[in-house]
Image (spheres, helix red, strand yellow):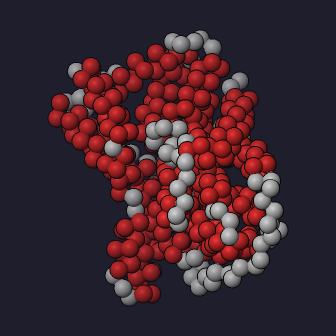
Amino acid sequence: MKPVAIILFLLMYVLLLSFPKIRAQVALSTAVIFVILGILPIDNVFSSIEWNVILMIAGTMGLVFLFIESKMPSLLADKIIEKTPNVKWAIVALALFAAIISAFVDNVATVLMVAPVAITIAKKLEISPVPSIIAISISSNLQGAATLVGDTTSILLGDYNGMDFLDFFWYDGRPGLFFVVQLSAIAATFILLYIFRKQKQGIEPMEKTVVQDYVPTVLLLGTVVLLIIASFIPNKPDITNGLICMTLFIIGLVRSFIIKRDAKVFKEAAKEIDYQTLLLLIGLFIVIAGIENMGVIADIGEFIAGLSDNPFIIYTILVWGSVLISAFIDNIPYVATMLPVVTIIALKLDLDPTVFYFGLLSGATLGGNLSPIGASANITGLGILRKEGYEVSAPTFMKISVPFTLTAVTVGYILIWILWGF
């Protein structure tokens, strides 16, 4: 049965790559076949799904919808632009703003928040918005690994490794991924400043967005605070973080309904939740549990560990291999598959797996920036430009993304090994 499981798993990946619009259906269909064939016993299906991850993502998406609807992101962007002397600093400031927001909000949602400001500036100055939208997209991806709620891959790692919100800041007595990502971001920002060094057009003050409802902002900040508090609670239920995100989303949604007295708020909020991603993850959790049950994960881990007895070489393969793979395939199924593989590798080498976990997340999260199709935020940004009449070629995108990504990954690669490789 193991060969059948491997063939089905590989076929699933091929179909995920070939038909990105039906990824959820592909993963769920494979999961159903796994259960029918007995690759994963039906009794293990429910327990194989990481419900904490599903609830966290759904709740965060809902909160982000309320946050965007309040117009607070637009106001913050307006205030930032007000302080910038020229286009170069405006582009970099918007990219940094997108990065900060993206540490706590989904990357795609971040692009949807910040991109309209960049479009408005470009129209007023009669310049192309392409460079600024690319910078915003890749900057939002960079910060995805900074916090527990920064990206789906971070949520996957946190749930798999039992990490709480504060563990991304300080873990086992050492600086966590947050500080690694910030140093990577600083290095990458210098790359942006160099790329946009000739953009010196002045910027006139813009009309500021008016925000009348601050409660969604409070709810989003409250989510972060409660996740921090929950990290200090011992022996808490496995779905604690998910319940926090969902509860605050429901509070915000019910409040919105009471104020507007219109049931459409429920329909609008429901539309903003990415069910395709949630269903994709459910399918992947079942499939990965199935191949793990067949011993395939252990085989992959032993193969990679057998490539070298040197932990640094294995670490290097994981980081840069993840960068290359994530440049062309979605990093969610890749990270979900590789987390148990990394555990096997660490056991085989008799090492603490943390350096491999962090290296995997860093490479997979940042690697998506190499190509226009490597990350959902990139696809979203290019989609916004297409609606504005700008078709962006891969070479144009990569002139900015490649130096930015290689710089950020290299800094992270070195720092993670220094902090966790010894």
Query: Which residue occupies 71% across, 61% down?
Result: 91
- Residue nearest the viewer, comparing 374 with 203: 203
- Residue nearest the viewer, comparing 374 with 73: 374
Q: Determine whether 319 is above or below 48 in the image.
A: above
Query: Which residue occupies 68% across, 81% down?
Result: 208
Query: Which residue occupies 64% across, 81% down?
Result: 209
Location of residue 421 in the rendering, given as x and y in whole percent from the top left corner: 68, 26
Q: Determine whether 111 is above or below 190 in the image.
A: below
Q: Quadrant of the N terminus?
A: top left
| Count of all numbered marks drawn on residues in the image | 0
Location of residue 255 in the rendering, given as x and y in whole percent from the top left corner: 45, 80
Location of residue 81 in the rendering, given as x and y in whole percent from the top left corner: 74, 70
Query: Which residue occupies 51% across, 43% down?
Result: 374
Q: In this image, 242 relative to 205: left or right?
A: left
Q: In this image, 237 relative to 406: left or right?
A: left
Q: In this image, 90 relative to 359: left or right?
A: right
> Is residue 5 in sight in this rendering?
yes
Q: Determine whether 294 is above or below 217 in the image.
A: above
* Occupied quadrant, residue 114: bottom right
